[in-house]
Image: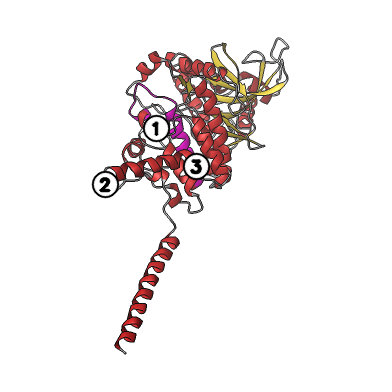
Amino acid sequence: MFSDLRDFQQTREQSSIGRVDRRGLGNTIVAESPEDSQAIRLALERTYLTHDELREASERARALASNGRTHPLTDVLVELGFVTRTQLNRLQGNSEDSGGRPAQQIPGYQLQKKIGAGAMAVVYRAKQISLDRVVAVKVLPKKLSKNHEFVERFYKEGKAAAALNHNNIVQAIDVGESGGFHYFVMEYVEGSTVYDELADGKVYAEAEAVRIIRQVAEALLHAHDKGIIHRDVKPKNIMLTKARVAKLADMGLARAVTDVEAAMAEAGRAYGTPYYISPEQIRGELHVDHRADTYSMGATLYHMVTGRVPFEAPTPSAVMHKHLKETLTPPDHINHNLTGGCAAMIEMMMAKKRDERYPSCREVLEDLDLIARGQAPHYAQQKLGHEVLEGLSTGQAAEVDRSAYQPPPKETQGGVLITVLGGVAAISILINIILLATRR
């Protein structure tokens, strides 16, 4: 089962926004009052609502009408969780309900703007009234609220996030249910995600990538020390504030290492995102530990410094097959400006056998700090040395894993060859001179 919880950032609508009236948008909207039509048009313009959601709601409204149950489209939009009654009231010019109080879908919070949507949840920017601060509220649509598995996962995410308290992790604030809506309140992060920047064509300089991943490693170390594995580390789940502080988000797949019941229930199924998932997650192994996060973090770093995902294929299953079987193209073969130390680290993090990866994020942090200072990584080089000695002791040519090896530049290899040939030529000339002198 792949991860389907999207990042918390605003969904970018590329399509143009059309005029919404009684005739509808592309024949997708049933008849509405002028006030409702205006509210829907504004909801699209302000990204409270997407065109796909509008089409889905329109189809639902038409289906109800065909069965003799006519519902205003605005009611259907609210029922499906695509917009809130508060938002519609504001867009229609009515900021208060009949009781004279602000219309509230989630008690204690004023939902202001939709900033993200995924297959399982919608995220709004909101105001926490009691503390007068901006927060993010993730809401599970009503259509999923009857699904016990979705609801259970939703609350597990909130509880996992609440167990963590770290500057590089999006903070959990509250979780609950109101009016049939399950909600999860969290810290609002104004900025972008690593995915957003990669989608815009950015390839990170090594120093910047190392700085960001170091913060992710700090966040994961905190989670691992608390007994929680994230299981979905990827560019979309790394948020960047305007001050470029990285914050790990989305604990939707997080699980306690000691949760044997959950592990047994998920055994045999792949949980994660295909481009960054670890081999043991793909196999659905019963015992998945913190080293799965290390693999995904390495895959994310690979993408950041090369501009490419580690393995590409037409289908998710084909991508995951490559994670299991295909040799990784060394990242410094793609980005020639990458240092050998950084390349060695990435490949050690992405070792297919988890016993060959870093034992914990503490060692990852040590090597990242060495690279940041322009020094060779300790653990990756140690791994290389061990493999070389092991190969020599068996009398065989050591098959050195590229995860800890940086070949000398071609220019250096060529220089060595020229030096050797020059020496041979000089010796040959000297021998000829001696032979000529002897003959005389």
Query: Label 1, on which residue?
Result: 278
Return the residue nearer the eye: 70 or 267. 267
Please tell me whether mark 3 sits on a helix, a strand or a loop. loop
Placement of the C terminus among the 4 image quadrants: bottom left
Query: Label 3, on which residue?
Result: 377
Q: Does the magenta stretch include residue 437?
A: no
Give the label, 3 or 1, closer to the camera: 3
First in sequence: mark 1 vs mark 2 = 1
- Res 272 → quadrant: top left
Determine the residue located farthest toward the top in the rendered image: 99
> Identity of the amino acid at label 1?
Ser
Query: Label 2, on which residue?
Result: 396
Packing grade of label 2 (10 A; few <14, some 14-19, many >=20) is few
Return the residue nearer the eye: 168 or 318. 168
Q: Where is residue 87 in the image (x, y as percent from the top left)?
A: 64, 23
Residue 346 seen in this snapshot = no
Q: Position of residue 345 (x, y in %)?
A: 46, 41
Give the label, 2 or 3, closer to the camera: 2
The residue segment tinted magenta is: 281-305
Please tell me whether mark 1 sits on a helix, a strand or a loop. loop
Q: Distance between the residues labelled 2 and 3?
A: 27 Å
